[in-house]
Amino acid sequence: MGRLFGTDGARGVANAELTPELAMNIGRAAAMVLISDEVEHPTILIGKDTRLSCDMLEGALIAGLYEYRRVDGKCISWSVHKSRVGINLLYIQRI
């Protein structure tokens, strides 16, 4: 596999280079970095396009985030409203 991340995010063939396992591991790694003491209020904004594989990869990414730490679901709708982005916004909270 070549370089995974480019200027527009992760690139590769779904279920070949971009697998659910890889997406889950990326979610775990992101959560570990964002809950470090260096980040006071870590947030993750997940963007995707309309390709069928995006739902699968998004679900795996979120599973990796959830697995590592608790996600405060109450913050999701408030954050979406406040930021006016209209897509899911996950708030990873230290426990």
Image (cartoon, rainbow, N blue to C red):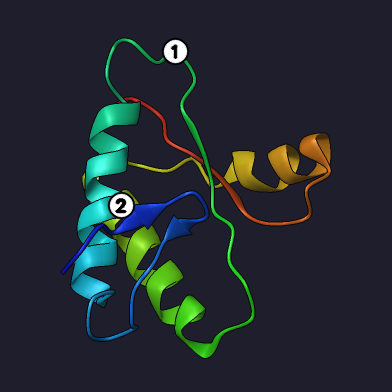
Q: Amino acid at mark 1?
A: Glu
Q: Quadrant of residue 3?
A: bottom left
Regarding mark 1 in the picture, which secondary structure is present there? loop
Front in this rendered view, residue 79 or 57? 57
* Mark sitting on residue 27: 2
Q: Residue at x 33, y 82 (%)?
A: 13
In the picture of the structure, the residue carrying the numbered disc 1 is 40
Q: Which part of the image, by quadrant, shows the C terminus?
A: top left
Residue displayed at 74% across by 45% down: 80
Q: Nearer the viewer, residue 12 or 35?
A: 12
Q: Is residue 51 above or below residue 42?
A: below
Most extreme residue toward the front is 2
Q: Residues within 10 Å of mark 2 (few under 14, many from 20)?
A: many
Say which residue appears at 36% left-offset and 61% top-offset.
61
Locate residue 18, reporting x and y percent. Answer: 28, 74
- Answer with mark 2 or mark 1, whichever residue precedes in sequence: 2
Q: Position of residue 26 (x, y in %)?
A: 26, 53
Q: Amino acid at mark 2?
A: Gly
